[in-house]
Amino acid sequence: MVAALALWGREDQKESQMNNPKGGCGRTAAMTRSRQLIRGIAATGMALVLSACGGGDSQVLGPKETSTTGGSNNSGWVAGVYKASANFKHLCEVPRTGRSAFTGITFPDKRGTRTNEKDFLRAWTNETYLWFDEVTDRSPAIDSQTPQDYFLLLKTNRTTNSGAPKDNFHFYEPTEDAEAWEAGISYDYGLRLKVYSTMPPRRYYIAYVEHNSPAAAAGVQRGDRILKIDSYDLVTDESDAGLNALNEGLFPSVLGAAHNFELQAVDGTLKTVTLQSAQVESSTVHQATVLETDTGSVGYMVFNSHVEKSQDEWVVAINQFKQAGVSDLILDLRYNGGGLLSIASLASYMIAGSNVQDKVFYEQIQNSKQARLEPFPFLDEGLYGLNKNVALPTLNLNRVYILTTESTCSASEAIINGLRGANVQVFLIGATTCGKPYGFYPEDNCGTTYYTIQLKGANAKGFGEYSDGFIPSTSDNGETLVKGCRVTDDLEHALGDRREALLATALRYRDTGSCASAVTRSLQKTQGISGSGELLVPETRKILVLDRP
């Protein structure tokens, strides 16, 4: 099983002798569903959902700050004294039996205690957490405290210069959820939502629809606004019954659940569809097309997630672009929250080829207890699937246009930073990225996968401090300011439509160097869209993940 960095995902350790980071972030605690704020559960990474007027009645689930620091107790705990985490690994209060439904691997669990699980987390944090010396040592022997509650305390409480939490990326999820994600599987309708307001009047829109999903079969399209679910008004309902029904409709808890949706299309027409939750397999390369222009052929790729199967999907797309003789690439990362660092690396190689050959993609910096890791290179051979150990195709480009929003995170940001570190010209079209320069090695124990920051990264030029994101700008300072154009996501047009604002601006910028665009926008007037909105995705998917050393 692999570790995660802050980009996202996990890989089988034998797939690579390198340290393959993943990165990401997550909520630091679970939120209860309440009448005022329904947030889902951070353990599963869902940050959301519906809010009624008034707000502020949410509850953070977590252990009380019981005074258990300093000294010792009858559990054998002594503050500042640590045994190796291997002494407690897989000792579980409730051991699992059988095999994983996703990997086929037999569960390694053995009979243990709740305290054993917390002993493991305490020791593992002390060994690997980037800021281990900023963690208050607490007794693991409080029986009422779950391992997950205890884990949420095992992080730094310091803040950045701006006053923001230094570590806002500390989270956990059920291991089966992590494995499903890595397999590219979700249990829903295939809808990807963008939210402009969780408070009444709520505004929930369809950002895109997964291919071959229940939503696609029902004709749901990008830009559709959700008005009602099972006759409950998503825009205004504040009743307990309404909020519960709306949340269940948006995020069904079982397979085969059917719900009726009333939608308003971009042109204002209303339609009603019935959606039934199913196992949905995503296409991480959501779209790959060739756009003909007066100045040559341009490849356009919508890339939504860094998982193992992305590699072979990239190979198909790059070969398509090579055959068409494209002279430029527009890489659409607006909804890509991250994943495997290895995928970010090999994707970057397939873009730039000889321009990055044998150069450093990502410097990996761990805590002082860990040995120095070798720099992560631009990978020129496949690691997975049909192209494992096969030389990867490349466009050999010395520049790339990348479309971004606030949902462009972690491994996606590593592509931006890694290419710039190798002197490949990157142009950003869209909004400031989310800013997640850290990574984890995901750690599975007793049915829960834990993510704690273990790495920070830098490119070949030594730059890696982009916690406030990469910013499209009129100038490029080699750090967070990247030359390009600020543009708001355009739900009125389909992805790949030359009239869509980000794509239209990228094409114009390529031809003229100007950010000005003649794109007309009517959706803001017809449906009240303003601002950038937020893609509704699990926080646990905004990460960068590495292989364990």
Image (spheres, rainbow, N blue to C red):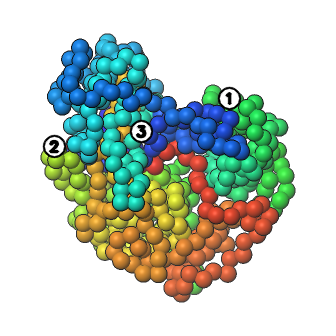
Q: Where is residue 353 in the image (x, y as percent from the top left)?
A: 33, 68
Nearer the observer: mark 1 or 3; the answer is 3
Label 2 with label 3: CB-CB less than 8 Å: no
> To which quarter of the image does residue 98 belong?
top left
Label 1 with label 3: CB-CB less than 8 Å: no
Amino acid type, callout 1? Gly
Which numbered dot is residue 354?
A: none
Q: Mark 1 points at which residue?
A: 256
Q: Position of residue 182 (x, y in %)?
A: 44, 40
Q: In this view, does 219 lie above or below 490?
A: above
Amino acid type, callout 3? Phe
Look at 59% across and 37% down and name the residue there. Answer: 58
342 with respect to 266 (left or right): left
298 with respect to 213 (left or right): left
Look at 29% across and 53% down and name the residue there. Answer: 456
Q: Mark 3 points at which residue?
A: 171
Q: Name the residue under label 2.
A: 369
Q: Position of residue 330 (x, y in %)?
A: 50, 70
Q: Distance between the residues labelled 1 and 3?
A: 29 Å
Look at 30% across and 14% down and name the residue there. Answer: 112
Please say whether residue 340 is visible from this viewpoint. Answer: no
Mark positioned earlier in the residue sequence (1 or 2) = 1
Q: What element carries label 2?
A: loop
Please say whether residue 46 is visible from this viewpoint. Answer: yes
Amino acid type, callout 2? Lys
